[in-house]
Amino acid sequence: MKTKFLLAIIFLQVVLSCQTGKTINDKKVVSLQEMESIFLEINTPFKYGIVFKHPDTTKMIDSPTIFRHNDKWLMSYIIYDGQGYETWLSESNNLLDWTSKGRLLSFTENTWDANQKAGYMALVDINWGGSYKAKKYEGKYWMSYLGGATEGYEKGTLAVGMASTFSLDSAHEWTRVKTPVLQPDDKDGRWFEKNKIYKSSVIYDSLKLTGYPYVMYYNAKGKKTDKADFESIGMAVSDDLVNWNRLGDDPVITHNEGICGDAQITKIGDIYVMFYFGAFWKPGAFERFACSYDLVNWTEWQGDDLIAPSENYDEKYAHKPWVIKWDGIVYHFYNAVGSEGRVIALATSKDLKN
């Protein structure tokens, strides 16, 4: 009788965990019902098409970050021209028509980041349908960036740098912290980041769920045992945007092959949503998402891709997301690679063409 009673209690706990989104040991898992609800909210089935090409169309562009300032939309983006990455700024009044404004991070000489400066705007409001404005720290706006000294496409040692500015009113050179803030060979570097560190995304967490106000997600390349290198998404935390502590021993998102990368965080109700792209653990490159209650434990969506190749302009890759909701419409910006080269494309929750 006692055994039956204990089994009944365990069964009840399991049922409650499925209903509340929590496991018995309180490690939070987002329920299938919640995941499906989030998918319906963020889904963008209508491909609007290409919305931005760099003025010099011979150069490849990548990694849009969309934010709002003084009643206008701004997009930080990166270009690759054979030498390495630089960071540029574009502007729009309507999220559809974009004009390039100039450089934010340029090539330099004799610096740790001389030939690689791929920047990503930091501290953008993560609330779904929110202001999408960038928050200041110590009176300045901030961006993290992929930096390195070696010429070529992601060659040599790549690490994370930080840069700042007092104004977003024009395109101008940002002030960079003199040394990298995260490197693959740091003493506390983890197994999955020992080769290279790539794109980073920094958010402000007013709740300090990790114990820190600033949280960074970044994709990095490393390997387990004798497997080939693959990219996973890991975490770091900070009190001041310059001194970072790695969080956890393992990635928060990985498939142990191919790529999981370019995380963007938004908050819908009490659920944090991570948009990211996957590649090569199934054919091509495509957009995915995961959900969390605490920014640390993530439940991956197992259903359809958010975005996948389907048009000539994204037939090779449809990846590297930035997703917002504005005036009731979801805008999913992504890097499209296909017939038009490497460009910024858009999919939406409403058909804007008709």
Image: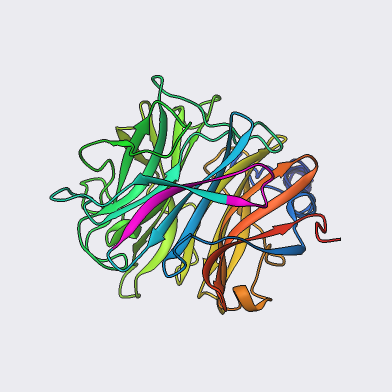
Which of the pair 33/213 is nearer the observer? 213
Query: Which is more toward the observer, 260 or 199?
Result: 199
Q: Main secondary structure of the magenta part?
A: strand
Give the colour scheme of this rendering: rainbow
Q: Position of residue 90 (x, y in %)?
A: 52, 47
Q: Residue at x 35, y 59 (%)?
A: 192
Number of numbered callouts drawn: 0
Q: Is residue 97 magenta?
A: yes
Please say if 285 is above or below 288: below
Residue 186: image location, x then y, percent: 22, 47
Residue furthest to the left:
110
- Give the residue displayed 66% in from the left and 65% down from the top: 307
Quadrant of the image occupied by residue 60:
bottom left
Q: Nearer the viewer, residue 103 or 206?
A: 103
- Res. 236 visible in picture: yes
Relative to 155, does residue 33 appear above or below in the rendering?
A: above
Q: Which residues are magenta?
A: 84-98
Can residue 217 be seen? no
Residue 117 covered by magenta stretch: no
Horizontal side, residue 8 vs residue 318: left or right: right
Give me the residue at 39% from left, 50% from top.
Answer: 87
Q: Quadrant of the C terminus?
A: bottom right
Kindly give the residue lying farthest to the top in the view shown: 139
Q: Residue at x 16, y 51 (%)?
A: 109
Q: Residue 160 vs residue 49: left or right?
A: left
What residue occupies the far right of the structure in this picture? 354
Residue 238 is situated, as x and y percent measured from the top left of the image, at 37, 31
Q: Quadrant of residue 32?
A: bottom right
